[in-house]
Structure formats: C-alpha cells, structure tokens
C-alpha cells in the first residue's frame, strides 16, 4: 500500500491536475432538485436544473472534466493518476459530482414522465464526467432496457458492477456493515445487487437463461433475502420447462 501511496504522490507532483468545483449555484440547484424529487414534483425538476445545465461544459479532445465517488483527496489523487497514465494525456480538471448528479436527477424524472430518450441522453452526458459510474450506469441500463436496447443495457450493468468492484477497496468507501457509506441511499453491496438484478433481467430478455440464472444466484449470495432475485429464479425455472 505504501508503494501505491508513493506513486499517487509522485503523480500529483509531476502531473498537475487543477482542482475545480462547480459554482455554488449548482450545489444549491441539486439540493432543490432532490427536494422536488422527494416531494414527487418531477415536472418541476427540469426548470430547477436548466440554468446549471446551460453552464456545464462538455468534455472536449483538449480538456476533460472528471468526478469520482471516492471522497476527499484520495479521489482527487486517483483521478490525477488515471489522467497521468492515459495513453494520450489531456488537461484534466477534477470537479465535484454535482454536475453528474444534476443530470441523474433530471434523467430519473424524465424516465418517470415517459421521456426515456431524454433520460438516456442526460445519463450519457453525465457519464462523460464519471465514466462507468455505478449509479449512472445502472440507471442508464434500466433506461435502455425500457427502450428494448438489451445489448446496450447489458453493457451498462456490467460497467456498473465493475465500478462497484473498483470502489470496494477505495479509501472512505471500504467500511462494511452499519458503517458502510451510502451513495444515493444505498451501499456498495446494494448497488452491486442492483447491477446483478439488472443484468439478470436483460439476460432473460435475450433468452440467455443459464447466464441469467447464474447472475441471480450471485445476487442471492450477496443478499439471501433478495425477494426479486428469488422470484426471477422461479420464472427462469418455468421458462426452461417450456
């Protein structure tokens, strides 16, 4: 572990990645959007987030914005190291998760109101800043599944699962049990289960029943009380008998 810490320190010293936070207004807009979501006022969310989204820049070939779920300086250093060892390094600025989370809330409400294409577009934009993020990838997976893009959905659930595995040993996110940190209301174990259930659902739709059964059993190994996975396994058993 000391060698990794030293590598991170050397990268931070030799490859300067400026730290940047979105304007305070974006954080306020996020809290207002979350409040509207919790109060079942999804139609209001678009207007709340619009001023921020008009300001948020897209990534370009010359400049990339990155955010991470890893808290504090550990997250900044990890993003810094990844930028330094990239095959074609570009200027990379570390931002908070507010940009992606604003897009996530908008996408969630778009999906709730039946605007699935808009939801997919917002989530794809959010993933520019947090590639393969467990929250964004899972939500995009469910959105694509609703749009009957099952191959695309499968790729997103696989990405979400891989991101959970990546984050499990990260500083600040490696606590277990009652002390386990929560990301959008769920633990890393919970997000892993979501990714597996989403993957299982898509595999059933693709008629890949053996893979789906294995996936749901993995979800049950994480949480033996997972009623949804139990139900889906019964469904798969029935399908195999046809």
Image (cartoon, rainbow, N blue to C red):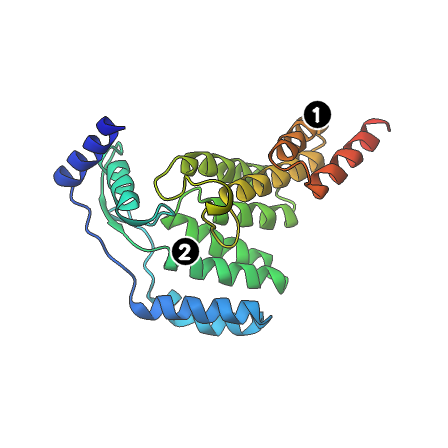
Q: How many marks?
A: 2
Q: Which residue is mark 2?
A: 100
Quadrant for the N terminus, please: top left
Q: Quadrant of residue 222?
A: top right
Horizontal and vertical percent position of residue 20:
24, 56
Give the number of the disc on residue 195.
Answer: none
SS label for mark 1: helix
Pick the residue in front: 152 or 224. 224
Pick the residue in front: 239 or 7. 7
Q: Quadrant of residue 57?
A: bottom left
Query: Vertical placement of 221 versus 68: above or below?
Result: above
Query: Vertical placement of 142 versus 21: above or below?
Result: above
Pick the residue in front: 76 or 179. 179
SS label for mark 2: helix
Horizontal and vertical percent position of residue 71:
34, 48
Q: Is residue 114 left or right of residue 232?
A: left
Quadrant for the C terminus, please: top right
Horizontal and vertical percent position of residue 238:
83, 32
Cβ atoms under marks 1 and 2 closer than 8 Å: no
Q: Which residue is mark 1?
A: 210
Is residue 160 visible from the viewing direction of this image?
Answer: yes
Q: Is residue 85 left or right of residue 199?
A: left
Mark 1 burial class by Cα count in 10 Å: few <14, some 14-19, many 20+: some
Horizontal and vertical percent position of residue 208:
69, 29
């Amino acid at each position: 572990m000391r060698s990794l810490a030293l590598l991170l320190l050397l990268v931070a010293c030799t490859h300067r990645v400026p730290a940047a936070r979105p304007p305070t207004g974006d954080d306020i807009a996020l809290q207002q959007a979350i409040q509207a979501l919790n109060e079942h006022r999804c139609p209001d969310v678009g207007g709340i987030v619009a001023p921020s989204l008009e300001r948020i820049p897209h990534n370009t070939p010359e400049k990339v914005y990155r955010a991470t779920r890893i808290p504090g300086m550990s997250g900044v250093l990890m993003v810094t190291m990844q930028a330094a060892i990239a095959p074609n390094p570009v200027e990379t600025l570390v931002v908070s998760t507010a940009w992606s989370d604003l897009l996530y809330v908008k996408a969630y409400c778009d999906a709730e109101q039946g605007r699935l294409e808009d939801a997919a577009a917002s989530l794809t934009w959010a993933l520019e800043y947090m590639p393969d993020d467990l929250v964004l990838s899972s939500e995009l997976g469910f959105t694509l599944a609703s749009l009957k893009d099952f191959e695309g959905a499968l790729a997103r659930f696989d990405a979400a699962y891989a991101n959970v595995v990546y984050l499990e040993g990260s500083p600040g996110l490696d606590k277990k049990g009652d002390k386990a940190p929560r990301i959008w209301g769920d633990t890393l174990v919970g997000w892993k289960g979501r990714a597996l259930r989403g993957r299982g659902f898509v595999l059933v739709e693709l008629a890949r029943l053996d893979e789906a059964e294995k996936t749901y059993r993995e979800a049950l190994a994480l949480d033996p009380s997972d009623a949804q996975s139990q139900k889906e396994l019964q469904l798969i058993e029935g399908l195999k008998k046809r």
